[in-house]
Image (tube, helix red, strand yellow):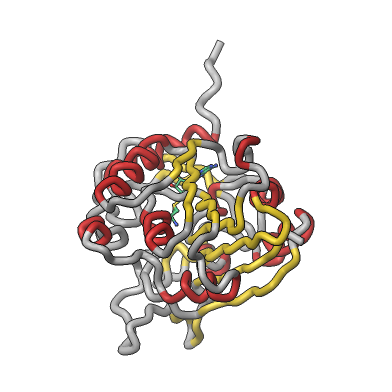
Amino acid sequence: MDQPGPSPLELNRRNWDDRARIHGQDRIYDSRALIAGASSLTEVELEALGWAVGEVNGLEVIHLQCHIGFDSISLARMGAVVTGLDFSPVALARAADLARRCAVRLDLVQSEVCDPPARLHQRFDLAYATIGVLCWIEDVGAWMRAAFGLLRPGGRLVLVEMHPLQAMIDTVDPLVLDIPYNFDGPHVFDSPGSYTDRDAPVDSTVTVEYSHGLGEVVSAAIDAGFEIRRLAERTDSPCDHRGDLGPADPDGRHRLRLGGGLVPLLYTLVAQRP
Ligand SMILES: C[S@@+](CC[C@H](N)C(=O)[O-])C[C@H]1O[C@@H](n2cnc3c(N)ncnc32)[C@H](O)[C@@H]1O
């Protein structure tokens, strides 16, 4: 009898292990700058934190899907007590090594994000997650319930995410859409390299990804028990997370132009556990 193939979660974890091995000195992740003291937080994350909590100094923060720990380290340097959570052991090992080289203390937890260990429940003032987290999650309701469960009453969620409208667009010219706006189940991709470098050596190239429209994300947050504090959409971004936006405009921001209009690139959701 045929052995069942790896689950979507296992395919994604293998891909993230491979990507975590190669990330760190590329167009997105500059380890040398981080170690020298630079923050990885852009104006977008800082704005979101300002809306959510003002200062992070002294707060207990859970960084969901922390990857190789750049933002975890940056938040810790701002005085937060940071726990980074990710399902990739390679990403967490890289985060631990970077934290050591930055002389920053991080608590790192390997876990599937929708099922965090019970010892973390209701321990945090802030749940923080950014850029490229929800597309790996089949059940956005479960993700929101997990984030809610990690927070103390009064705790805040900051989610800065790629806008689902731009996520639909594979190529602009010619215009090719490769994933729908709203959830319709799994989409399997087989792409070389990583978003940092398409030529980078990655063995596990198959991923399983999911769409989550803005209405679905906000409704999932409400259904989990959150009160929505802010929802902001941006048609500009300080970074080219897609890798195909070309040079920044004279104001230093990247934009995606389509048919004479601007496509939303990012959104920020701030919510509170009552
Ligand atoms: C695009 S990265 C997030 C980038 C992050 N904002 C940063 O600052 O580097 C996505 C992360 O989500 C993690 N991930 C994906 N699916 C996950 C899951 N189901 N549970 C936990 N972590 C997951 C991956 O290992 C990866 O580190």
Above or below residue 163? Residue 203 is above
Q: Position of residue 34 (x, y in %)?
A: 27, 60
Question: Which of the 4 image quarters holds residue 28?
Answer: bottom left
Q: Which quarter of the figure is the C terminus placed in?
A: bottom right
Residue 268 percent location from the top left of the image: 57, 70
* Lateral position of residue 33 relative to residue 169, left or right: left
| Apparent side of residue 185 relative to residue 179 in the rendered image (left or right) | right
Residue at 38% from the left image edge and 78% from the top image edge: 254
Residue 108 can be seen, yes or no:
yes
Which quadrant of the rendered structure holds the N terminus?
A: top right
Residue 62 left/right relative to 171 = right
Seen at 48% across and 53% down, the residue is 81
Look at 47% across and 69% down and name the residue there: 45
In the current view of this chain or complex, which residue is farthest to the front?
58
Q: In front: 187, or 236?
A: 236
Q: Quadrant of residue 74?
A: bottom left
Residue 148 falls left or right of residue 172: right
Residue 264 on image: x %, y %: 53, 76
Callout count:
0
Say which residue appears at 31% left-offset and 36% top-offset: 203
Whether residue 12 is visible, yes or no, is no
User: Residue lying furthest top in this view?
Assistant: 1
Q: Where is 203 relative to 158, above or below?
A: above
Give the x, y percent position of residue 179: 55, 57
Classify 6 as above or below 226.
above
